[in-house]
Structures are given as C-alpha cells and as structure tokens.
Image (cartoon, rainbow, N blue to C red):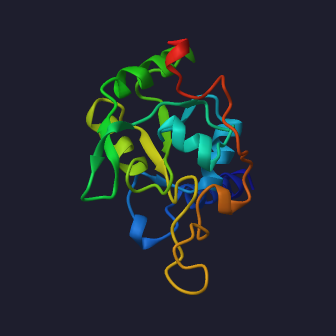
Amino acid sequence: MKQYLAALVLCALALALAPLSPAHADDMGISPQATYELNKTDQSVLFIDVRDPVEIMFVGFADAVDQNIPFLLVDRSKWDAENDRFWLYQNPDFATEVEAALAARGLGKDAMIITMCRSGSERGEPSARFLRENGFPNARYVIGGFQGDSLKEGDKKGMRIVNGWQNSGLPWQGKPNPDKIYRLDNR
C-alpha cells in the first residue's frame, strides 16, 4: 500500500510539473498552479518576477513571488521603432542579484528558481535559460507568465485572458508589494 501511495504521489507531482501545451514542451516550463503549490510548501524554491517594476505597477503583482528582479529593464530614453516600444536592455546584475537572493535565504545556486514575466516567452523562458547557462541548473519559468497569452480570435481577440497566473484563479493584486519590488532606493 505504501508503494502504491508513493507511486501515486510521484505521478501527481510529475503531472503538476509537466508543461501544459506542446508549444511549451521543454524541461523548464512549469504551470502557474504548480508554481503556487511549490512556493507555498517548499522553502528551497526561489520564485522571482522578472518584469520591469513599472510594468508591475500598471499590470499587477503576485505577492506569492519572493522578489522582483528584472531580467530586462526599460530604457525610457531610447525608442525601439522596430517593436514600437522603449528599448529593453538586459539587467547587467541579474545573475548576481539572483545569487544574492538565494544566499539571503540560505540557498545555493543549485536551488530551484522559478521566473515569471508577463507571458512567459520574452523574459520568463529566456531568463531561466540565461540562469541555466550561468550556473543555476534548476532554473524554470512560469508557462503563460503573469497575464497569459493573447486570445487569437473572437470579440476579445488580443486580450490576455487565455492562461497565466491571473487567469488561473491564483492570488494577485493591483499594487506591488514595496518590500518585494525592485527599487533603487533600497539597494
């Protein structure tokens, strides 16, 4: 009976950690629900929001994250005409800041790190890949990110209501937590 229960638990965990769609079929993607459960129950997981803090201020924040450490920052002095937005540049201190966040919790670079951006694609997956390439072997990212993917058809086409943290019924709020948000005045 114990073996059966152990096998059942392992199967349930494998399903929870499995990617949700073939588009995200890699070993780094993890569902918002599995992230939430792991973060609640496992103190050896570091959950970071990798969005620019201004984006968080306008889009919303999941207080379940341990810290906001931006992977890409917005340079409001340069316009990216090709993408119709301000220029984004990689936070040069990203890996160092992640390592410091791990150390502050008594964790090493081999701990599980889960990154979350708006959709999972432009900063979530690339930040997890970057961390893996820089000595953090257990970096993962939230599939669908905070807001999720855009609806492809219908009256609400283009709205981010498909998946992601917000659309999974997980807790979030409109305002960032000042103790967790990336701030230059508390560095």
Res 173 → quadrant: top right
Residue 151 image-quadrant placement: bottom right
Q: At 66% from the left edge and 35% from the top edge, which residue is drawn? A: 176
Residue 100 lies left or right of residue 137; in this view the side is: right
Pinpoint residue 17: horizontal percent, then vertical percent: 55, 55
In the rendered view, tell whether residue 105 sits above or below residue 180: above
Does residue 40 lie above or below 85 as drawn?
A: above
Q: Quadrant of the N terminus?
A: bottom right
Total numbered labels: 0
User: What residue is rendered at 26% in x and 56% in y?
Assistant: 81
Front residue of 59/110: it is: 59
- Find residue 155 and report its horizontal and vertical position in percent: 61, 85
Q: Position of residue 57 (x, y in %)?
A: 61, 40
> Would you identify the image quadrant in which residue 77 lies?
top left
| Residue at horizontal 66 percent and vertical 22 percent from the top | 179
Relative to 46, does residue 7 appear above or below in the rendering? below
Is 176 left, or right, of 142 in this rendering?
right
Residue that sits furthest to the bottom in the current view:
154
Q: Describe residue 153's horizontal placement relative to residue 35 as left or right.
A: left
- Of residue 87 and residue 101, the one placed in the foreground of this image is 87
Q: Residue at x 34, y 30 (%)?
A: 91
Residue 152, given in percent of the width and then of the height, sits at 49, 80
